[in-house]
Image (tube, grey):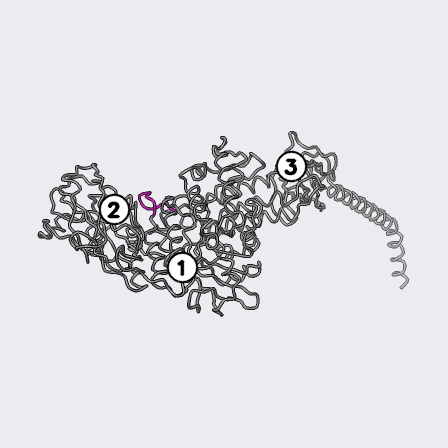
């Protein structure tokens, strides 16, 4: 969703609510005020408190803290005409400082009703002023020593005098503030803790009620079931391995995934039209593996029964109801597209098959809901080639699309985009900083649950105060970590809005199939979304692993009908690569690197199944052209084509050798032809690859010994012998010729003088 500024994160955490605290520390003397309302001070307005919060601390330091306010319950989450005439807030205050605090008092204040959507949005970003109505304070404790706490329960009438009630006479969205004051040692009376939120009022008991809109809002709720990847090794029944056993707690009573399912079950009947489950196929795959037995760090996993029970309940709850598949392992589709991992991205959006198999129900087809609800143009083009017809996007991910109805992105291929309601969905984030994640599961500051009170106010404003027939598609965070009471409260409020006529249920399939009124929309990728993608380092590692894996797959063949298919071996490793680029690892590079290491180890293990067996003793070659015997072992349940590569070795020259087809689960002795250029002992490095160069197994060093001349040596020797014979013959011939010439020489000399004398 939209990127939150640091100030927004701080303030919306306070707005988010119940069971969440906000402290307004500064030096106590800085807040000392004159007496007012019968008390020795007047509290500082909420907006000033939050503004001075950071100013009171030195750069790089946390502001001082005195009290922590923990609100457990607020009796009126949405006020209706038949509601109780009072509102009750209960909880406790805790002295978290190093000094005692005197005169701890509390009151509930309210601001003026918010009139416009901009007012509501601003109040969600930063607490609105809530000092318009300020009843008298109520004493909580005379003294609180460091570490002490005191419970409270404050009941305030909705109507009545301003000194004793909230004085609400008309429907509206009201900012309210639980304001705790006290006097720390060495300081004056001041506001020391506060909780700010919004109170939606559709009807005032005994007074006016908001009229039902002529065209009610059309509400659809996406209910996500997702987790961070935890599968380390996917094996046969009972042999899968998980990186940890945290899912056991999550699937157990009170756990996060248990609570999500429980809240879904409670609303599924009455919201059967508008409620749609969005489930991560990898979560289903993991829980199914757990239900048959599994291991964690070499020990037996403890969650077999919990996984089986949760999965059975989920099957029953989703039977015949709306279900869509998230990208498998909630993979970062944009990161995959940028890395040109098209086939891996195609696998990510084919998770509907897993949902159909595990849950035994038919999910809506050809749907993609990317992480954060945004994609770039390249990812969009890739998804369209994969027959995706329906996209669920955040409004920030679309341009040229006014209104709230679904929009056509491609009229020829009939591709549409359904838009989330950003105001309600962002409010459900509860002020959780994206950087504050633990294992891909949102964990709010102080590990306190995230309230949905601000989201309730946004939803009531959309339905009760705008009421223009708009589409309101709501989606909690992917890995929502709220207490079940908050989840059921949100869904329960939606049901009340349906019953009261302020909203109507609209199914997701209806949004997908109804011809959109808006045309010509385009996808848009916000700049800040790029900063949250899986890091290029991790994606590069996944790219290399993918190339290795697919290079092996290309050379595999099924041996027979009783053996494994190549995809049976490769598919689990492809899924492991998706886990390494899961959206759960956004802003958590360490988690992504760890997942990438897991997939790398799995692929290394696959490569090591095809290897050369080392020799225990030197190999003796009887002649210069004797081949080197090499034993190859294939432990895979498929045939695979391999190439033997002999490293350059002085004294040995390898000859050409055809690629070898290794039988499944077999061993073969291959004689590698070589030419020995000289006698002696050699260390020859031999390795295996696929014909395309993908390494298999480890390089093996073979010791080779030869006392024979090689072919080249014999040829050279023979050539030298022939040359010697020729040279010797030439020498003999020249000697004979020279001797003959010497015998003939005297006769010539004796004749010459006579001829001279006669002349």
Q: Is residue 266 left or right of residue 674?
A: left
Q: Is residue 139 left or right of residue 90?
A: left
Q: Nearer the viewer, residue 187 or 599?
A: 187
Point out which mark residue 503 bears: 1
Residue bearing the label numbered 2: 89
Q: Nearer the viewer, residue 113 or 27?
A: 113
Quadrant where the C terminus sits is bottom right
Magenta residue span: 442-450
Residue for point 29% across, 52% down: 15
Assign a secondary structure to mark 2: strand
Assign a secondary structure to mark 3: loop
As measured in the structure, the alpha-carbon distance from the residue carrying label 1 to the one carrying label 3 is: 62 Å
Residue bearing the label numbered 3: 635
As measured in the structure, the alpha-carbon distance from the residue carrying label 3 to the one carrying label 2 is: 67 Å
Q: Residues within 10 Å of mark 1 (few under 14, many from 20)?
A: many
Residue for point 44% across, 61% down: 419
Question: How many numbered marks does the figure carry?
Answer: 3
Estimate the x, y position of residue 353 in percent, counting from the top left: 58, 49
Estimate the x, y position of residue 233 in percent, counting from the top left: 53, 39
Quadrant where the N terminus sits is bottom left
Q: Is residue 500 left or right of residue 290?
A: left
Q: Please name which of the two marks, 1 or 3, marks the residue nearer to the observer.
A: 1
Point out which mark residue 320 bears: none
Estimate the x, y position of residue 412 in percent, counting from the top left: 57, 68
Pointers 1 and 3 in contact (C-beta within 8 Å): no
Pointers 3 and 2 in contact (C-beta within 8 Å): no
Q: Is 544 situated above or below 662?
A: below
Assign a secondary structure to mark 1: strand
Q: Nearer the viewer, residue 27 or 721?
A: 27
Estimate the x, y position of residue 633 in percent, counting from the top left: 66, 36
Does the segment drawn in magenta span residue 627? no
């Amino acid at each position: 969703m939209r990127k939150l500024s640091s100030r927004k994160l701080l303030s919306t955490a306070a707005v988010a609510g119940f069971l969440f605290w906000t402290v307004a520390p500064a030096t106590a003397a800085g807040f000392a005020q004159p007496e007012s309302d019968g008390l020795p001070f007047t509290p500082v307005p909420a907006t000033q408190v939050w503004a001075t919060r950071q100013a009171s601390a030195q750069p790089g330091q946390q502001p001082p803290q005195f009290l922590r306010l923990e609100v457990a319950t607020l009796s009126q989450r949405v006020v209706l005409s038949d509601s109780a005439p009072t509102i009750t807030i209960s909880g406790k205050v805790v002295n978290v400082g190093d000094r005692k605090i005197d005169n701890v008092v509390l009151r509930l204040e309210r601001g003026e009703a918010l009139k416009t959507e901009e007012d509501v949005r601003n109040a969600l970003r930063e607490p609105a002023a809530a000092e318009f109505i300020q009843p008298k304070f109520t004493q909580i404790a005379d003294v609180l020593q460091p570490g002490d706490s005191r419970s409270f329960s404050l009941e305030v009438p909705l109507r009545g005098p301003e000194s004793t009630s909230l004085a609400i006479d008309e429907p509206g969205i009201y900012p309210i503030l639980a304001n705790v004051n006290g006097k720390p040692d060495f300081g004056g009376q001041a506001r020391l803790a506060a909780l700010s939120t919004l109170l939606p009022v559709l009807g005032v008991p005994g007074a006016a009620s908001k009229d039902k809109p002529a065209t009610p809002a059309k509400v659809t709720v996406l209910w996500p079931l997702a987790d961070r990847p935890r599968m380390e090794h996917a094996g046969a029944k009972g042999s899968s391995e998980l990186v940890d056993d945290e899912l056991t707690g999550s699937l157990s009573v009170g756990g996060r995934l248990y609570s999500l399912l429980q809240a879904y079950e409670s609303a599924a009947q009455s919201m059967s039209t508008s409620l749609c489950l969005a489930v991560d196929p990898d979560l289903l795959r993991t829980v199914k593996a757990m239900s048959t037995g599994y291991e964690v760090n070499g020990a037996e996993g403890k969650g077999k029964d919990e996984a089986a029970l949760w999965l059975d309940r989920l099957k029953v709850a989703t039977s015949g109801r709306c279900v869509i598949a998230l990208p498998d392992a909630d993979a970062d589709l944009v990161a995959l597209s940028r890395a040109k991992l098209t086939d891996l991205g195609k696998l990510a959006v084919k998770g509907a098959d897993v949902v159909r198999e595990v849950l035994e129900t038919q999910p809506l087809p050809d749907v993609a809901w990317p992480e954060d609800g945004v994609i770039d143009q390249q990812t969009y083009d890739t998804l369209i080639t994969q027959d995706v017809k329906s996209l669920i996007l955040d409004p920030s991910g679309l341009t040229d699309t006014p209104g709230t109805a679904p929009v056509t992105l491609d009229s020829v291929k009939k591709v549409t985009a359904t838009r989330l309601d950003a105001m309600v969905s962002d409010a459900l984030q509860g002020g959780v900083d994206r950087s504050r994640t633990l294992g891909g599961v949102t964990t709010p500051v102080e590990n306190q649950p995230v309230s949905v009170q601000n989201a309730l106010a946004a939803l009531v404003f959309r339905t009760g105060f705008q009421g223009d027939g708009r589409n309101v598609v709501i989606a909690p965070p992917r890995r929502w970590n709220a207490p079940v009471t908050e989840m059921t409260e949100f869904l329960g409020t939606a049901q009340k809005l349906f019953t009261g006529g302020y909203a109507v249920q609209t199914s997701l399939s209806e949004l997908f199939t109804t011809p959109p009124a808006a045309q010509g929309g385009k996808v848009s990728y916000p700049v800040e979304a790029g900063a949250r993608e899986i890091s290029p380092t991790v994606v590069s590692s996944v790219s290399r692993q993918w190339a290795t894996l697919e290079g092996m797959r290309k050379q595999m063949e099924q041996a027979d009908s009783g053996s494994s298919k190549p995809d049976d071996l490769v598919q689990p490793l492809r899924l492991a690569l998706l886990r390494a680029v899961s959206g759960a690892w956004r802003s958590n590079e360490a988690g992504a690197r760890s997942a990438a290491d897991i997939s790398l180890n799995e692929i290394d293990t696959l490569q090591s199944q095809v290897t050369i067996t080392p020799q225990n003793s030197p190999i003796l070659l009887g002649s210069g052209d004797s081949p080197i015997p090499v034993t190859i072992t294939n432990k895979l349940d498929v045939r695979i084509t391999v190439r033997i590569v002999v490293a350059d070795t002085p004294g040995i020259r390898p000859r050409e050798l055809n690629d070898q087809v290794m039988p499944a689960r077999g061993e073969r002795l291959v004689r590698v032809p070589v030419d020995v250029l000289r006698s002696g002992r050699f260390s020859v490095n031999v390795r295996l690859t696929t014909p395309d160069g993908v390494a298999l197994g480890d390089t093996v060093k073979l010791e080779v010994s030869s006392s024979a001349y090689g072919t080249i040596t014999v040829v050279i020797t023979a050539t030298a012998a022939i040359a010697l014979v020729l040279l010797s013959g030439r020498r003999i011939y020249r000697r004979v010729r020279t001797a003959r010439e010497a015998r003939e020489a005297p006769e010539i000399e004796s004749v010459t003088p006579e001829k001279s004398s006669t002349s």
